[in-house]
Image (tube, coloured by chain):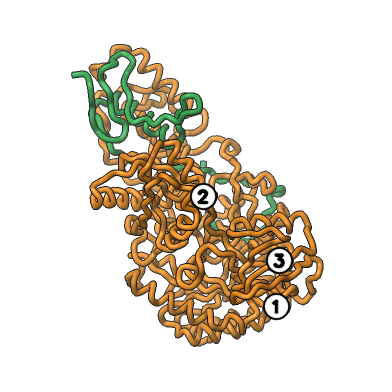
Amino acid sequence: VGSLWHGRESYIAFIVRSLRQLLEIIDLEVQGSPVRVDGFKLRSVPPETDSPVHDLSGCLDLKGIGRFEPRLEYIANQLAGLLKAVELLSAGRPVAPTGFRLKKLAHWVRYDPYHHDPYTAVLQYLSWPCQTRCEFCLHQGDPPGTYTKSPYGWMTSIQEIKTRLKYWDPEARQSLPAKSEYNFYETLTHPRFKAIARAVRDKTRRPFTLVTSGNPLSTEMIDFLSSVAPVFLGVSLNSKSAQTRVQLMNDRDPVTSVESLARLREKQLPYFVSVTAFDAIEIEEIIQTIRWADRFDPYFIRINLDAHTRYSPVRRNLKTSMAKWRQIVASIRRIREDVDAPIIFQPAMMEERFFMKKNRLIVEGVVKNSPAWDAGLRAMDEIVSIGGIPIAYRTHARQLLHLHSVTGVDGFTLEYLRKGKPSRVTINGRSTSAAGPYRSEGIPVFQPYGILMRAGLDPDQLVNIGLLAQAHRAKKVLILTSELVKPSLKALIKENEAALAGLDLFLEVPGNTAHFGGDIVLGDLLVADDFTACITSWVRKRAMKPDLVIVPSTPFNSWGRDLTGKPYLAIEREASIPVEILTCERIQSLN
Amino acid sequence: MKKNETIGKEGNENPANNREEEFVFRFDFSSVQEESFYADPIVELFRRQISNLLEVVVLMDGEKQLKIDGFKFLNDSKTIYQLFVPGISGGE
């Protein structure tokens, strides 16, 4: 054994302790069967690195689940490290473990702030192949190794779903480690959907948020969904034309999908309509679809500005896409006043980027027959004060409106500008008509009094940048942002220069090239390698190093892992510059 | 022991009535990174143990976060082994 090691006994004791500790929480496996290990031999040379191909069936994707519970990856890495140094024995015979299994699942139940939500904790695992096959489906552009392209398969066994359900505590927000985040497949088509939905409903009264192509929304399914209410549906309508749905979505039953809106209204099941502005759909057809859908009182209509990764069959460059998105947003903004349902765009900041004053309190939409609607507030009104308190940023307005709504504040004044002209309304929370679609409860979307307003930037973030710079005694600070957020951040810094006095600030946008590529502009979809590449290139171009780099928190989860599972700490190691995370809200989120 | 089963027929999923075996959370080693920095298996073992640990915890000195990039053995205070980039400094 290694020549430097004089204390062989200490080394052996270390291995014994490490193995014993690991074997308290896991069992080792050989080719899927548990194996009992009772000894080991030290290796003088590491074993061959080529491990034989073995059966992965029933195994979970360690890389996927490791994003949410990296201690599992830690265990695997520790074991792999130990196996390079020792040969394990079982009853005196060598064994070569190929994997491990957890001894007690109860050890792994943990708090997660989002695991009060039935979809996030359980229902998402019912994802099942769609009955439609959309030409613009984002899963066609999944990079290799992601959820749907994993060699472990992407469908979850019923036994796993039931086990996850068993360990889920919605009130404590505790559950087993998640294994996916961006999972938008159908759940309504799963053969066990109804039974699982009923069992989930037995555990919580929280609303189910379910997205569907519309195809499974038969009368019988809508009746079932009503029986497990509250349910908030997202119907991927895309076009009111049955012919377009057949052509672009390969919908074999477009009539059921299109007619589902009338049935949902009749059953008073709240839903939103989603329309993807795909190249092959003319803008006029999108506008007709919006006007038509509005007749059935959707909660809102969401226009998805479609983007494609480098793996997608659709190829576009960012410049072309930006021009196209701008044109779509401009055309749809023109009809907003004619439509009752709020129209919102995805990505959220796109409308602000193209057409709006930055960081203002613009109301994105007002839900029909809500208190704000009844008071006369409408989309594009700019709030200036709430209850007599002047408000300058959306984050502050959201906090105050939320506080008012949860504490039952009623009859407060809201001052706003409409096309630049000052006006005021009194919001009376008890004055809602029963006509719908507005509901004060059971809608998992931020909508106090029916006002839809997504998160934004605020000066507190600049204060935090200042504090981070101070902690590092940094003067030159490089802030990495996204194509969508940069103009708003620039405006925020300009309006609040005093907050960052004495600092040399530089803003830079990393290209989304390491993972997704294509015309993806969302900062939330950047990965650690994008940030590292951006810093390296910035340093090379400017021939100087910043004292500190600040990256947004939103591409990283609570463990600081990006979509590929890489920790943000790697950016600092690889770029050799101090890196800090700035906590930001996910602007895409509707809640 | 049987492996995890897949989809069955529609039934009562109420966990209170569920007497079935739990799903076993199983993992294989195939996705574990195999890259070794040091030929000496002892040094490499400790490098991996420490670098793995630093992927899930931040070491602290009082209130101060420590940023660690290497280690040395207590019986050889001159040789420093890098954790994330192959290399040795100090010593011979």
Q: What hue does chain B carry in this figure?
A: green
Displayed quadrant of residue A32: top left
Specify the amino acid type for callout 3.
Leu
Foreground tag (1 vs 3) = 3
Q: What hue does chain A carry in this figure?
A: orange
Quarter of the image that includes the C terminus of chain A: bottom right
Specify the amino acid type for callout 1.
Arg
At horizontal 54% and vertical 59% (from top left) the residue drawn is A456
Residue A461, numbered circle? 2
Estimate the x, y position of residue A281 in percent, counting from the top left. Answer: 45, 83
Estimate the x, y position of residue A413 in percent, counting from the top left. Answer: 74, 65
Q: Which residue is mark 3?
A: A414
Residue B77 or A86: which is nearer the viewer? B77
Displayed quadrant of residue A431: bottom right
Host chain of mark 1? A
Residue B10, numbered circle? none
At horizontal 74% and vertical 55% (from top left) the residue drawn is A406
